[in-house]
Image (cartoon, rainbow, N blue to C red):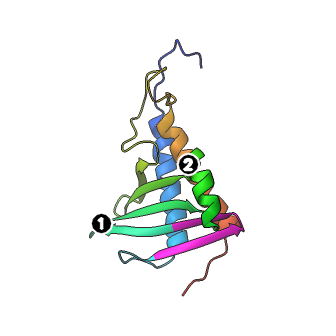
Amino acid sequence: MSYSQRYHPNLKQLLTSCEVNYVLLMRLLAGITEIGEQREFCIDNDHIFQLTITEQSRYTHVVEFRQLTRKESDSLRIGKLLPKPTMIIRLYHDARVAEVIETAKSRAIKPRYDYPNPSMLHPDEKQQTYQFLTEWLQTCLRLGQTAIK
């Protein structure tokens, strides 16, 4: 896509991502439903991911999904240069979709951005965020080790 062409979101692809991410998140949560409950997935010594339920209502849950650093000294040194990825995701149980409502970069992700823009976000930033979440979740399912209580 050349930058002279205006980007148009692919709604079918975006909805499919929301549905896939919902299924993957439900598998990773595996029965935890209360506010404050957490589950960690250790990929290796340097890659740990954590899911935390932060809100709950009759038809939705809000989950924080973030990457942790095992060593505090590394976290302080690396965190200043490159913050660890974090996403806040709302799960809609009636529609069976997961919506990214916040990332470390942005409080709300627009469906489309003009380019260039002051934040240097890609025109398809929302679709890329959902794809990144899918890859994160698949990595946790495929390689993650967790203690299920």
Q: Which quarter of the rendering shows the C terminus?
A: bottom right
Q: How far apart are marks 1 and 2 (CA)?
A: 37 Å
**Which residue lies most toward the bottom here?**
149
Q: Which quarter of the rendering shows the N terminus?
A: top right
The quarter of the picture where residue 64 lies is bottom left
Does 132 appear above or below 116?
below
The residue that mark 1 highlights is 59
Name the kind of residue labelled 2 in the image.
Lys
Q: What element carries label 2?
A: helix
> Callout 1 environment at 10 Å: few (<14), some (14 to 19), or many (20+)?
few
Res. 82 visible in picture: no
Q: Which residue is drawn at 59% across and 45% down?
A: 81
From which residue to which does the magenta span run?
Answer: 38-50
The x and y percentages for residue 44 are 73, 67
Q: Which residue is drawn at 48% across and 23% down?
A: 7
92 relative position to 139: left or right: left
**Which residue lies most toward the left here?**
58
The x and y percentages for residue 59 are 30, 66
Q: What element carries label 1?
A: loop
**Which residue lies most toward the top here?**
4
The residue that mark 2 highlights is 80
